[in-house]
Image (spheres, rainbow, N blue to C red):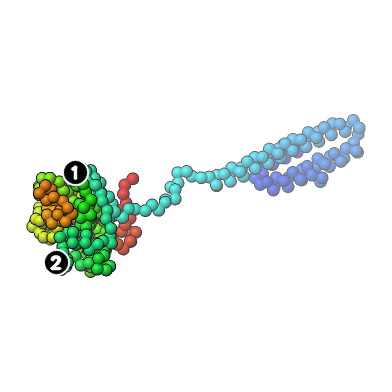
């Protein structure tokens, strides 16, 4: 009984079934109980032997049942652990990290470049006085150059600045030249009553640059803009200066960079000229310096104004400026920074 029962018990795979077997073997109606109950009918000399035997079998069965029960319980726990196991090699839930806007990245890069050359970064108000936006920049009322920059007026004196050039005037007024030369850039938003199209936006960005010191020449301007062009568009770039007109610079130039698609040979990107216009610049007009109280017998300088929107379009081959302002994540997420 003991051996056969033991083997059967060890084959059981279910706790309920095991309990049923226990009841059938050791319960009130089981064989052991029956033997013990029948003891009274036995001979006195037989009783201790049969009793000891029955007890031994019962103990063996109890032990067998107990060990099987423990084995099954352990198996249940193990199965549970296996099914609830955490796979630490699975990829985690990715956080949706934001991306700096491509224009912000472009402006950060330009700021880094100029700060590395010792320029200070200055900001000015977007709601600007007519006085700084135009008058101080040598564009008096009724001057035809005002038409070059169609303006959002707030009232007679206030407007949305049409360029970052008023920051030149504000900084020149405050600068103490006895402490050294002025080298500044000013990045920011500007506004014009332009009709939005692929290359024009009514709100866009500019980055102004201004250097005023003794003995500043056009060669300083050209060297600076060449270094800038190489930094942004690639080390192979060359630049050329073409005569232009701005009221606040004299002489004034438009700056072209050799096309970075064809290297200057001529292609669709540069309209087969080999050159791409990237910014306006010039030597600071003496009137601008005088308006700000700077002694033009001693000091002179150069200034430039570039459009980070247009720079980013050229650098990344973006054909519509409106892409920057539509906040389509499929567009913006393409400009993920490393790290
Ligand atoms: C100016 O605004 C001058 N203040 C720049 C300057 C500063 C010249 C200092 C000399 C010395 P302009 O209007 O060309 O110039 O604009 C400068 C740049 O802004 C352009 O080269 C172009 O990149 C960008 N820009 C002008 N209008 C728009 C527009 N509607 N949308 C996007 N970018 C524009």
Q: Residue at x 72, y 46 (%)?
A: 19
Front in this rendered view, residue 110 or 335: 110
Image coordinates of residue 126 in percent, x first then y, are: 28, 60
**Residue 10 location in percent, x, y?**
67, 40
- Residue 329 got which mark? none
Whether residue 334 is visible: no
Residue at 27% x, 68% y: name it: 155
Q: Is residue 130 above or below residue 54?
A: below
Percent position (x, y) of residue 148? 16, 65
The residues tagged by marks 2 and 1 sit, at their Cα atoms, a distance apart of: 34 Å
Residue 143 numbered tag: 2
- Respond yes or no on whether mark 2 lies under 8 Å from ligand 1: no
Ligand 1 near label 1 (Cβ, under 8 Å)? no
Instruction: Please state the quadrant of the image where ligand 1 appears.
Output: bottom left
Horizontal arrangement in the rendering, residue 50 relative to residue 215 (left or right):
right
Q: Is residue 123 visible?
A: yes
Quadrant assignment for the C terminus: top left
Depth check: give the residue in front, 303 or 106. Answer: 303
Image coordinates of residue 88 in percent, x first then y, are 47, 43
Task: Please say if the residues under marks 2 and 1 sit with CB atoms less than 8 Å apart.
Answer: no
Residue 322: quadrant of the picture: bottom left
Q: Quadrant of the N terminus?
A: top right
Q: Is residue 162 left or right of residue 329?
A: left
Within 10 angstroms of label 2, few (less than 14), some, or many (20 or more) residues? Answer: few
Q: Which residue is mark 1?
A: 178
């Amino acid at each position: 009984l003991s051996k056969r029962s033991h083997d059967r018990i060890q084959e059981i795979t279910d706790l309920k079934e095991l309990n049923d077997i226990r009841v059938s073997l050791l319960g009130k109606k089981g064989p052991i109980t029956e033997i013990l109950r029948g003891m009274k009918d036995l001979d006195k000399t037989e009783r201790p032997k049969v009793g000891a035997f029955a007890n031994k079998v019962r103990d063996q069965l109890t032990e067998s049942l107990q060990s099987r029960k423990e084995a099954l319980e352990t198996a249940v726990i193990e199965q549970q652990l296996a099914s609830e196991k955490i796979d630490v090699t699975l990829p985690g839930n990715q956080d949706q990290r934001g991306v700096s806007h491509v224009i912000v990245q472009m402006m950060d890069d330009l700021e880094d470049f100029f700060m590395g050359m010792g320029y200070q970064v200055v900001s000015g108000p977007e709601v600007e006085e007519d006085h700084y936006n135009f008058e101080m920049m040598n564009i008096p009322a009724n001057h035809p150059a005002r038409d070059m920059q169609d303006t959002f007026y707030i009232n007679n004196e206030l407007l949305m600045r049409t360029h970052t050039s008023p920051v030149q005037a504000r900084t020149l007024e405050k600068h103490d030249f006895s402490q050294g030369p002025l080298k500044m850039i000013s990045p920011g938003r500007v506004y014009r009553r332009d009709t939005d199209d692929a290359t024009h936006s009514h709100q866009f960005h500019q980055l102004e640059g201004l250097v005023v010191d003794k003995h500043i020449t056009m060669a300083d301007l050209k060297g600076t803009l060449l270094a800038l062009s190489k930094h942004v568009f690639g080390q192979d770039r060359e630049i050329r200066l073409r005569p232009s007109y701005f009221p606040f610079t004299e002489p004034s130039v438009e700056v072209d960079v050799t096309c970075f698609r064809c290297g200057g040979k001529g292609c669709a990107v540069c309209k087969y000229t080999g050159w791409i216009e990237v910014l306006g610049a010039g030597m600071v007009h003496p009137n601008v310096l005088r308006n700000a109280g700077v002694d033009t017998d001693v000091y002179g300088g150069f200034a430039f104004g570039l459009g980070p929107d247009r720079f980013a379009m050229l650098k990344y081959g973006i054909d519509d400026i409106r892409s920057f302002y539509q906040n389509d994540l499929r567009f913006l997420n393409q400009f993920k920074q490393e790290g």
